[in-house]
Image (cartoon, rainbow, N blue to C red):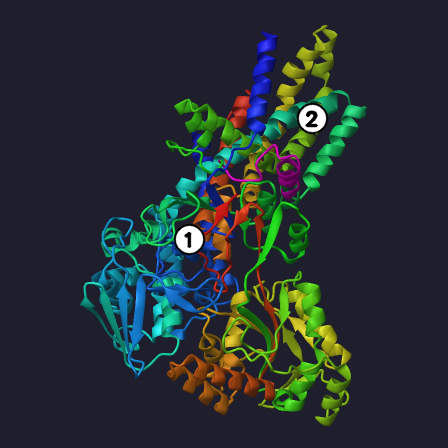
Amino acid sequence: MRHAMLTLLVAVVLQLTVGSALGQTFVFGAQGEPVQLDPAIITDGISSRITRQVFDGLVRYKGATTEVEPALAERWDVSGDGRVWTFQLRRNVRFHDGTPLDAASVVWNFERWWKAGHPQHDNQVKAGQTFEYWEAQFGGFDDKSIVSRVDAVGSHTVRITLKDPQAPFLANLAMFVFDIASPSAVEKWGTEFGKHPVGTGAFKLVEWKPNQEVVLEANADYWGPKPRVKRVVVRNIKDNSQRLGALKAGEIHGMEGLNPEDVLVVKSDPDLQLLLRPTNTTGYIAFNFKVKEFQDKRVRQAFAHAVNKKALVDALYGGTGLVATQFQPPSLWGYKRDLRDFDYSPARARELLGQAGFAQGVSEITWDDGKREPLVFWYMSRSRPYFPNPKEIAEAMAADLAKVGIKAQLQTADWAVYLDKRKNGQLPLYMLGWTGDNGDPDNFLCYFFCSPGAPREGFYANNPLAEVLLRAQKLTNQAERAKLYRQAEQMLHDDVGRLFIANNQPPLAFSKRVKGYVPHPTGSEYFAAVEIQ
Amino acid sequence: MRRYALQRGLTAVPVLLGVSVLVFSFIHLIPGDPAVTMLGERATPEKVAEVRVRLGLDRPLWEQYVRYVGRVVRGDLGVSIVRGDPVLTDLLRRFPATVELATAAIVVAVGLGIPVGVASAVWRNSVVDSLARLLALTGVSMPIFWLGVMLAWFFGVTLRVLPTGFRLDTGTAFVPWTNFVIVDAALQGNWPLLVDALRHLILPALALATIPLAIVARMTRASMLEVLSREFIRTAEAKGLPQGAVILHHALRNALLPVVTVIGLQIGQLLAGAILTETIFSWPGIGLWVYESIEARDYAIVQGTSLFIAVIVVVVNLMTDLLYAVVDPRIRYD
């Protein structure tokens, strides 16, 4: 009897301690739970990572670039004036619910996004949701939109007419938000469609277990190259260290959200590989132009020479950061490669301060209305890809500034308050950044500098710069536009409108058994080419 | 007894009202416009205004409160701001996971804490006692988030004998009946599922049990020491009763009362600890959910869950009070 008990105990212990095999399943560790899975409504990377597998757009980004290639549309042409786009759809493509993809279904999707009165638009708005990216990228809804007509001109031909040419039009369409959903599924589920997504993508949704995981299964009828794995599971692991633990333990195959200090852990592990996402993000320091001291360009130049960007990036980005010389990250086609950045030179900085009449340094500032106060440098209370350790980065910059006689007190605020104060132009000197949406230079530069004097941008008013940017927005020829964006970067640099500090290449960690994962700058990758060996 | 229970129940009403005021007001106490926080860096002023109206933030404070209490009383905890799902439904779906974890932790804490405390008291100042006291001190002082990560890395990553997190392996089929995985597995006679669930439960339960275990052990020891010095123990020993019987039937029974109080008080602590434990171990209960909702500024969920937890703590304390009579028949409520 005793023997039997012992055997049973051993058997139980053995069973308890043996892990399960993962087989043909790719398990990815995400930083959180998807909000929902209706691509037209979501705005976050955790949700869009999943919708990208389930849906396709008319066009998509090519590999790791932000260039556009065919997806559901096989080819397209644009009229000479840049206003009429005609898309030829791929034939014999079906949604996961079996309904065919045709011109009518594409037009239906556009009308849902665009027309506030569309029943499947209206019901979402009533439920408190918005079609945020449509509004942002295409100017608004109904008559406010830059889109004036969307027609099915054949069974598989869609014509989109714009009021004005829009340069980033194709880049916009490649964004995950404009992926095409099955009209019949949207009509069936209504506002619950976000829990029951149906697209044409390489994977179908099997199950979403709240707070745990989303399970996808390969779509055997996929129009493109067939997925290499049978299943995809995206698990929600909030804690960065635990996620890395799960990867090291073999419970997941890949993950995002590595702590900068864990990059070395991954590099030194023979079973793991580190992949860097091409940079699409820039961290900056902004001046408030209502501060008299900052109105003097020599003072701003002194700041630019004082901050040792290279030392900062080397020390605080875990080896994944790049020194930024301009607003656009180097992955964008408007990037100005030959822009000569300010050297790190405390001596030059002191000299410039002296010329500006601040030989004693700067520790107090004067606002436009005459109010004097100590100089405060505001730093972010939250980590962002462009500033992964905001406090440490701010401390390093403040130390550099102190070396040339600029004595700034560091201060932070709750994220909401911080953004509020920034929007109202109340921060004298602050750090923030931007992550690109669609790989178009317009998405970086124009959002910030097309409305001169905006409180949100520290009242920075550079009218010639705004003119160049607005001109570039109307052109469709990429080479011509690139020239203008390079010119804009030079103007911004010459005026020292802002200090660009760093670009980051967010690190991802994978088991060495994983092949074919190509990190994309926008953060939405296709898992169809992922293989497990 | 019934009258006492009623009276005791009525005292809970002002407590709950107080909690409702607190829970209601924290949305207004934390700095920043909730609408702005929710919508983030890129929100337009029109959108912010729209959300303020939708959340009723444009109304006077008292009106917001009255509406809030009115809804809560009808069992309506609102809908998630981010996802739009009813809070109560989601709460009830996630709650079993937390109950399962907290129960396991209590079983560990009581099952180990009482024997350790008794042993410590009986062999006072021995090596056993010193060791037990050292462990108890370490246990209370150890932060869960640190201990949890260490446990997961040691057993999950270094030894690879237990999973680093989650409630089940990916791919384990589970048909929820009660949503208590262990109960369902037992009811369905699904042994692989039961094994899988238990493997996942061990580490988070240990992490969550550490502090209550230490407290229960210390309390048991102190209470036992006091009882052991009483005269009736000497009498029992003088009668020639075996030592085991004296300790278990005479001493422990009398020493348990303060221990029960402490265990009751630990429930609140456990639910708070569950937020950290669940987050570290990706355990899909209300703790992880609250953590994510705080991050996403989903006030409706945070408010609803806080209120729910407060009700549970109040109810558990009430039950603890009533349990005294069971533990100690000398206590009468009349």
Q: Disc 1 designates what residue?
A: A50
Question: Does the magenta portion include B152?
Answer: yes
Which image quarter holds the N terminus of chain A? top right
Which sits in the foreground, B120 or A397? A397
- In the image, farthest residue toward the left: A154
For the record, the magenta segment spans: B149-168
Which sits in the foreground, A128 or A349? A349
Q: Disc 2 designates what residue?
A: B117
Q: Secondary structure at mark 2?
A: helix
Closest to the camera, between mark 1 and mark 2, is 1
Residue plotted at (36% across, 68% down): A173
Instruction: Tell me if residue B59 can be seen.
Output: no
Q: Is residue A322 above or below residue A368?
A: above
Q: Could you tell me the amino acid type at mark 1?
A: Ile
Q: Cβ–Cβ below 8 Å for labels 1 and 2?
A: no
Instruction: Tell me if residue B248 can be seen.
Output: yes
Residue plotted at (72% across, 70% down): A311
Residue B331: image x %, image y %?
55, 24
Q: Chain of mark 1?
A: A
